[in-house]
């Protein structure tokens, strides 16, 4: 198996635990340039933070997020989850995330917002189809 994987896409139908097992199977001595995950519940990502030490280094992550029903403050929920991801993934340089338009995030993740200690939101957009942001390390 090659030491470097260019792009790994995990689609909607793949159970989250299986996604983590797939990444763990690659091993921590490998590198994934880009990881794309669809239909991600941030609570599951944060619940599996301890697995990060067993995962390959990941340079860029693109997440299509879901916001579970009953979450009262979507902005805090999304910021909290993305901050946890930024702090736990080895090698991460950029995070791109999208989430449904119905999730009102207010000013929680506007441009310039810090995610963890090393990442800053460099761009964010709001559209009728959904919202998105880009956060980069060291900005």
Image: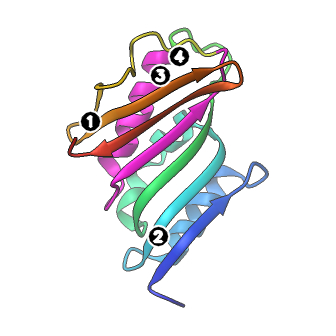
Q: Nearer the viewer, residue 19 or 127?
A: 127
Q: CA distance from mark 4 to mark 3?
A: 5 Å
- Which badge, 4 or 1, is on the more N-terminal residue? 4
Which residue bears the numbered disc 1?
Answer: 116
SS under mark 4: helix
Q: Residue at horizontal 39%, vertical 16%?
A: 108
Q: Is residue 91 magenta?
A: yes
In the displayed structure, 117 sits above or below 32; it is above
Q: Residue at horizontal 50%, vertical 69%?
A: 24
Which residue bears the numbered disc 2?
Answer: 32
Q: Nearer the viewer, residue 123 or 62?
A: 123
Residue 106 placement (x, y as % from top left): 46, 9
- Residue stretch rendered in magenta on the structure: 75-102
Q: CA distance from mark 2 to mark 3?
A: 27 Å
- Which badge, 2 or 4, is on the more N-terminal residue? 2
Which residue bears the numbered disc 3?
Answer: 77
Horizontally, residue 99 falls left or right of residue 81, namely right
At label 3, counting other C-alpha atoms closer than 10 Å, the crowd grade (few under 14, some 14-19, many 20 or more) is some
Q: CA distance from mark 4 to mark 1?
A: 18 Å
Q: Is the C-beta separation of discs 4 and 1 under 8 Å?
A: no
Q: Residue at horizontal 32%, vertical 44%?
A: 136
Horizontally, residue 42 falls left or right of residue 56, namely right
- Which badge, 2 or 1, is on the more N-terminal residue? 2
At label 1, counting other C-alpha atoms closer than 10 Å, the crowd grade (few under 14, some 14-19, many 20 or more) is some
Q: CA distance from mark 2 to mark 4?
A: 29 Å
- Which badge, 2 or 3, is on the more N-terminal residue? 2
């Amino acid at each position: 198996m090659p030491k470097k994987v260019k792009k790994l896409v995990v689609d909607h139908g793949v159970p989250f635990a299986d996604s983590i097992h797939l990444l763990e199977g690659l091993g921590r001595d490998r590198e994934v340039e880009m990881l794309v995950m669809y239909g991600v519940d941030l609570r599951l990502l944060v619940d599996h933070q301890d697995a990060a030490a067993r995962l390959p280094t990941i340079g860029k992550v693109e997440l299509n997020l879901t916001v579970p029903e009953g979450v009262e403050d979507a902005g805090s929920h999304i910021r909290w989850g993305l901050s946890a991801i930024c702090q736990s993934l080895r090698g991460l340089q950029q995070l791109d995330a999208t989430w449904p338009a119905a999730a009102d995030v207010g000013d929680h993740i506007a441009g310039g917002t810090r995610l963890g200690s090393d990442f800053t939101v460099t761009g964010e957009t709001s559209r009728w189809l959904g919202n998105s942001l880009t956060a980069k390390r060291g900005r």
